[in-house]
Amino acid sequence: MKEILPVGSLSDETGLGHLRYLLSNKSLVAYGDERISAKDFEMVLTKAERFAKWANRIGREMKIEGWIDDNQ
């Protein structure tokens, strides 16, 4: 993921960790045969919220054309 971004373009890379977590658990959540536990659900939800907040901030900082900040 980091490889596609311009060198030194991120002031904070914590959101990449949240995204990695979400991607690594995607199949379990979306396609798993069993329901995930409440604890796992809370963790996925927390990581998704943290990633969204981070992405909005980074989108503003990088002045991405057409970026829509849901927090405004």
Image: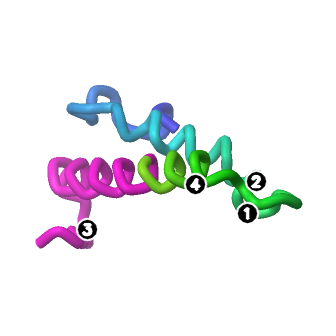
Q: Is residue 42 left or right of residue 5?
A: right
**Distance from label 3 to label 2 (Cα)?**
28 Å
What secondary structure is found at the residue carrying circle 4? Answer: helix
Q: Quadrant of residue 36?
A: bottom right
Mark 3 surroundings within 10 Å by alpha-carbon count, few (fewer than 14), some (14 through 19), many (20 or more): few
Which is in the foreground here, disc 4 or disc 3?
Answer: 4
Name the kind of residue labelled 3 in the image.
Answer: Trp
Mark 4 or mark 3: name the one nearer the start of the chain.
4
Q: Which mark is residue 67?
A: 3
Looking at this view, name the residue that lies furthest to the top. 8
Query: Residue 62, how many percent across, how many down?
Result: 20, 49
Mark 2 surroundings within 10 Å by alpha-carbon count, few (fewer than 14), some (14 through 19), many (20 or more): few
Mark 4 in CB contact with mark 1 (< 8 angstroms): no
**Distance from label 3 to label 1 (Cα)?**
27 Å
Mark 1 surroundings within 10 Å by alpha-carbon count, few (fewer than 14), some (14 through 19), many (20 or more): few
Above or below — where is 24 with respect to 11? below
Q: Which residue is mark 2?
A: 27
